[in-house]
Amino acid sequence: MAISVRNEGAKVNSDINVTPMVDVMLVLLIIFMVITPMLQHGVSVDLAPVNNPVAMPDAEKEDAIIVAVMRGGDIFLGNDKVAVEQLTDKIRDRIANRVDKRVYVRADKRAKYISVVGVVDNVRAAGVDQLGLLTDQKKQPTPNLPPGTPGATATPGAGQ
């Protein structure tokens, strides 16, 4: 009579199966790709670049009131398009029960001056305590690069 011996140790697979981890990571990547554009508040505007902008971290808050002036003169309060005549009433309604009566204006760098002034006048007429004009940091030239290098700026009178 023979003894049957099971060799279960030979069947054990010691390799790590990364397929489930890759599946989870791809799902997370897709979720972040879909959600990231939704995190931006309001409409997209090309802000005017300035040399020394003042940081306004309150403008990034969820409950911040942001008025956007588009290049063509369209005005948005948050994500809603409004007419200039309705802007004062809509802002007055939004700040009625708030302690912090602060509004931020995001004006396109190519928007007409009269459109931005009209928005500022209507915001002030609504009883806003503080008005913030949002801008971008102007890109600083890269110093000490030889001429002809991408990113180098020419100095007036240089090379003469």
Image (cartoon, rainbow, N blue to C red):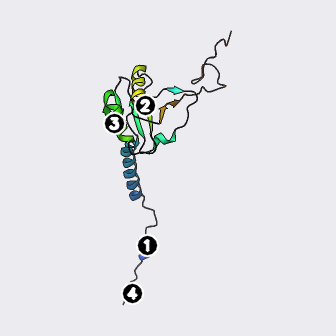
**Type of amino acid at the residue the image marks with label 2:** Arg
Residue 65 location, quadrant = top left
Which tag, 4 or 2, sits closer to the chain's start? Answer: 4
Which tag, 3 or 4, sits closer to the chain's start? Answer: 4
Residue 55 at least partly seen = yes
**Front disc: 3 or 4:** 3
Label 2 near label 4: C-beta < 8 Å? no
- Residue in the image at 48% along x and 33% along y: 132
Q: Distance between the residues labelled 1 and 4?
A: 18 Å
Q: How far apart are marks 3 and 4 (CA)?
A: 89 Å
In percent of width and height, residue 105 lies at 44, 32
Label 3 near label 1: C-beta < 8 Å? no
Question: Badge 1 local density, few (<14 within 10 Å), some, or many (20+)?
Answer: few
Which tag, 1 or 4, sits closer to the chain's start? Answer: 4
**Front disc: 1 or 3:** 3
Which residue matches tag 4? Answer: 3
Q: Residue 124 carries which label?
A: 2
Question: Badge 2 local density, few (<14 within 10 Å), some, or many (20+)?
Answer: some
Label 4 near label 3: C-beta < 8 Å? no
Pick the front one: 6 or 60: 60
**Type of amino acid at the residue the image marks with label 1:** Ala
Residue 64 location, quadrant = top left
Which residue matches tag 1? Answer: 10
Which residue matches tag 3? Answer: 90
The quadrant of the picture occupied by the N terminus is bottom left
Which tag, 2 or 1, sits closer to the chain's start? Answer: 1
Q: How far apart are marks 4 and 2 (CA)?
A: 96 Å
Residue 38 location, quadrant = top left
**Type of amino acid at the residue the image marks with label 3:** Lys
**Type of amino acid at the residue the image marks with label 4:** Ile
Q: How far apart are marks 2 and 1 (CA)?
A: 80 Å
